[in-house]
Amino acid sequence: MKIDLKTEILKRCWLFSDLDESQVKRLSSLAKSRSFAKGALILNQGDPPDFLYIVSSGLVRQFRTSICGRMFITYISSSADELNLAALFGADEYFLSAQAISDTTVLFIAKNDFLAFIEDCSAIKDRVLARLGQVLNSTYERICDLTGEIVSQRVRNVVYMLHRRFGNMVRFRREDIALMAGTTIETTVRAIANLKTARVIESRRGGIVVIDEKKLAEICRSSYVINTELNLPQSSLASSSENEPSLTTHVGQPQSFMS
């Protein structure tokens, strides 16, 4: 990838949006690029945190796998989102895995180079601290959601989060939403059917469409929206549910996160 393209991606990343041109170019010189096919793992939970990753194009799911093999999706990342930033600060391993939902290109910067850049660039320090605080708050919200909300509300919250992130057309399968809500596909289908009955959403090929944003906002809360400043072009989303790789087949035997 050319340096000017890398620079444009880094400028769009919230972490680096306060940097001046010379600082962004310096950071760009440290970044390398790599492409991943749909379904490929970008990084593995438990691996040493040697790099900061930034999504250049495509969609990436971040997830954690339990000891018994159950997957829980924590976040869907798109262009200019960073992956696993928190693990670079004192952790021995990545907390999460990251997998390409669509064909994806990422930038990666060596951990030592990134930390040295932060030391020399005071403008980015406040942004890093703010991002870590956002991640922590989002984690608390997810914990409260999983332990305190009824299952149908968790599904509604996930639909609202995806709507906030990607617009009115939510191109994610019911299996995807179930794994994000930590419940079964059957429960997710019932919750989505209730939203359709209430005229909040409609079903379309490859996803669902939000038709009443106000009503959806009234019954949900944006628990896990970390940054919604950037709008993802619809063309970079998966074109249909049939072509979407299952979230339950990242490694080993398929698993489901039961309610």
Image: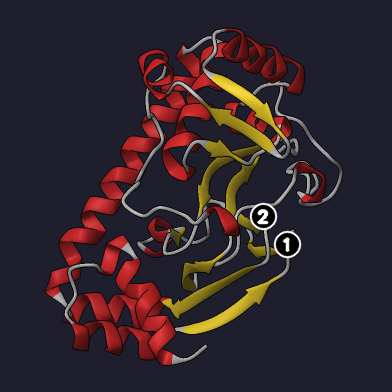
Q: Position of residue 199 (x, y in %)?
A: 54, 13
Is residue 30 among what the camera can see? no
Of pointers 1 and 2, the one earlier in the residue sequence: 1
Q: Which residue lies under the disc numbered 2?
A: 101
Residue 57, image x and y in percent?
A: 54, 67
Amino acid type of the residue tagged 2 in the rendering: Ile
Instruction: Say how the picture is coloured.
Output: secondary structure
- Name which residue type carries label 1: Lys
Q: Residue at x 47, y 35 (%)?
A: 163
**Does residue 37 appear anywhere in the picture?**
yes
| Residue 143 position by quadrant | top left
Closest to the observer, 79 or 235:
235
Residue in the picture at 55% in, 38% down: 169
User: Does 177 appear above or below 134?
Assistant: above
* Image position of 169 with respect to 114: above or below: above
**Is residue 43 depicted above or below 6 in this figure?**
above
Q: Residue furthest right?
A: 253
Name the residue nearer the viewer: 29 or 11: 11
- 17, above or below 139, in the image: below
Number of residues whose C-alpha sits closer than 10 Å to that of mark 2, classed few (under 14), some (14–19) or many (20 or more) = many
Residue at x-position 32% and y-position 84%: 27
Residue at numbered disc 1: 38
Asked whether, in this view, residue 125 is left or right of residue 154, the answer is left
Question: Residue at left 48%, top 12%?
Answer: 149
Residue nearest the viewer, comparing 113 with 134 = 134
Quarter of the image holding residue 221?
A: top left
The kind of secondary structure element at disc 1 is loop
Q: Are marks 1 and 2 in contact (CB under 8 Å)?
A: yes
Task: Describe residue 117's horizontal placement relative to residue 250 as left or right.
Answer: left
Tell me: 165 left or right of 33: left
